[in-house]
Image (spheres, grey):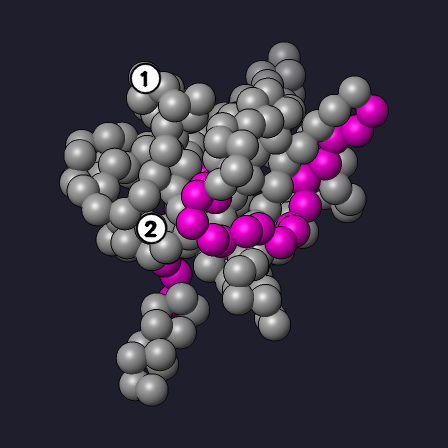
Amino acid sequence: MKKILMYSIIVLYFVNASAQVSADRFGTFTDTRDGKVYRTIKMGEQIWFAENLAYRPNSGKYYAPKDDTSLIAKAGCLYEFKTTKTVVPHGWHLPTKKDWEILIKNSGNNETDVYDSLIATKVFYVLLAGLHDATDGFMWANKATIFWSASPVNGDALSTWVFQFYRDDSSRLAKMMHGNNSSGNAYYIRCLKNDDEYEKTQKTKVKK
């Protein structure tokens, strides 16, 4: 009887410990500029917003999904690339191509696995909330979503690396690709918390 009781206590301990580790992945961040509270999640060593940035700046260009401002609270804002440089809250930054690639590496072995890991599990809370195109306006709702990176594409002044989620009747994928950073094209932002490596990089840039 004592052995059974001891075994039960040990099992309960590890179950609780596992639940605690899982719970510790999640947190919140309050943007003091507008009071909005964002969910956050730890993916590997990175801490990400678990939802899209929804801050409405006084200057710069941004768009509401489907041109409906009531959707911003849930889906966030679509920002033109130039505006991304001024809207990320203090202590966070627009992820680089390398930052996205670390998330991808930790999320699956191929484009479909990464899609399933970040969408099907809902831990990263990705919505296929479309994009804003300079020619066609809002498009691809329920089919795709794109997130900015801070990394330019070498040799192409009008392109920046972006992270795209896409699905149709025959496929689903999540991958890095070239995004158009010219006026009128707007994508979503996922903020990444500053770490020691990022702070060192910024200090080096300031010294130069």
Q: Residue furthest bottom?
A: 208
- Evaluate whether residue 139 shows in this view: yes
Query: Which residue corresponds to the image point at 57% horizontal and 51% vertical from the top-left?
Result: 179
Location of the N terminus by quadrant is: top right
Q: Nearer the viewer, residue 119 or 53?
A: 53
- Kindly identify which residue carries mark 1: 70
Three-letter amino acid code at disc 1?
Ser
Three-letter amino acid code at disc 2?
Thr
Q: Residue furthest right?
A: 170
Q: Position of residue 195 (x, y in %)?
A: 39, 61
Left or right of 104: which side holds 169? right
Left or right of 194: which side holds 16? right
Q: Which residues are magenta?
A: 170-196
Ranked by sequence position, the earlier of labels 1 and 2 is 1
Q: For residue 178, what is the image quadrant?
A: bottom right
Query: Which residue corresponds to the image point at 35% horizontal and 25% vertical from the top-left?
Result: 72
Q: Nearer the viewer, residue 154 or 165?
A: 154
Distance between mark 1 and mark 2 Cα atoms: 21 Å
Indicate the secondary structure of the residue bearing disc 2. Answer: helix
Query: Which residue corresponds to the image point at 55% horizontal and 27% vertical from the top-left?
Result: 139
Residue 83 is marked as: 2
Classify mark 1: residues with Cα within 10 Å, few (<14), some (14-19) or many (20+): few
Q: Residue furthest top?
A: 1
